Amino acid sequence: MRGVEQIPWIYDAICAFAEWRGLGRWRRWLVGGARGRTLDLGSGTGRNLPLYPAGVQVVGVEPSAAALPRARRRAPGVLLVRASAEALPFRDGVFDTVVAGLVLCSVSDPSRALAEARRVLRPDGELRALEHVRSRHPWRARFQDAIQPAWTWFAGGCHPNRDTERSVETAGFVIGADERRAQGNMRRFAARLAARTSTGTMSA
C-alpha cells in the first residue's frame, strides 16, 4: 500500500485545504525569499514551483515518479530531476538557496539530506524551510512518538516527531531569529551556514 502522500491527487487535496487554512501564506514566504540559483528539495507535485519570484533559476528534485508529471504541468519551464535528497546529483556549492517545504519530515535520513543541502549550497547561501516538528510540550511529544510508526506507514514516510530545527543546527546551520516563526507544531525559518573557526569548529 502506498501512503497518502504518495498518491498525488490525495496529497494535492490535503495541501489545498491546508493552504486555504493559512499554510499558503507560509508557503509564499518560503519561496518568496529565494534568490539566484535555487534548489527546490522534494518538489512533490510542484506546489512551490509557480510561486518563485521572477528571475530565480529553479531546479526541482523529487524521488517519486508519480508526482513528477503534476509538477511538470504546474511549472513547464522548471528543470525537474528525479533524485533523492540524500544523494543530490549536483556539484558542491552550486546553489544560492535550498528550499525545503514539508520534506524533512519524510526523507529516509534527514542528517544525510541536510549534509547534502549544505554541500550544494554556496558559502553565503541560505536554507529556507517550512516544516512540522516535534512538539515542545512533553505529553504531545510522547503522543507523537506513540503514533509515529502507524502514521509513517499511513502517510507514506512522514514522521510527526522529528526535531527538525535541532537537526538543521546539528548539520552546521544557524537559524536566523528574525524570520523564524512558530505556530503550534509548524515552523518556518531561514538558516545560513555556520562559520568555521581556525580550529575547525563551527560558530555563528
Image: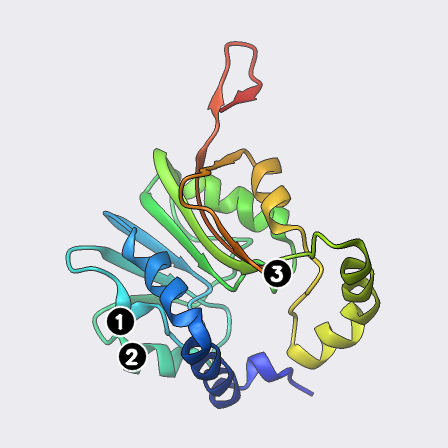
Q: Nearer the viewer, mark 3 or mark 1?
A: 3
* Residue on which the image places disc 1: 50
Relative to 58, say whether 150 is above or below: below
In screen coordinates, is 50 left or right of 134? Answer: left
Report the Cα–Cα distance between label 3 and label 1.
26 Å
Q: How many marks?
A: 3
Q: Label 1 is placed on what type of residue? A: Pro
- Residue 165: x %, y % from top left: 59, 46
Q: Residue at x 49, y 24 (%)?
A: 204
Q: Label 3 is placed on what type of residue? A: Asn
In screen coordinates, is 130 left or right of 155? Answer: left
Report the Cα–Cα distance between label 2 and label 1.
7 Å
Q: Label 2 is placed on what type of residue? A: Arg
| Callout 2 touching callout 1 (CB < 8 Å) | yes
The N terminus: image quadrant: bottom right
* Residue on which the image places disc 2: 74
Residue at the top extreme of this rendering: 198
Local secondary structure at mark 2: helix
Mark before the other along the chain sequence, 2 or 1: 1
- Residue 122: x %, y % from top left: 35, 36
* Residue on which the image places disc 3: 185
Local secondary structure at mark 1: helix
**Please, which colouring scheme is shown?**
rainbow
Q: Residue at x 44, y 68 (%)?
A: 82
Q: Quadrant of residue 201?
A: top right
> Foreground residue, 24 or 111?
24
For label 2, the crowd category at 10 Å Cα-Cα, with few meaning under 14, some 14 to 19 and many 20 or more, is some
Q: Residue at x 36, y 66 (%)?
A: 25
> Foreground residue, 137 or 4?
137
- Residue 104: x %, y % from top left: 57, 58
In screen coordinates, is 130 left or right of 146? Answer: left
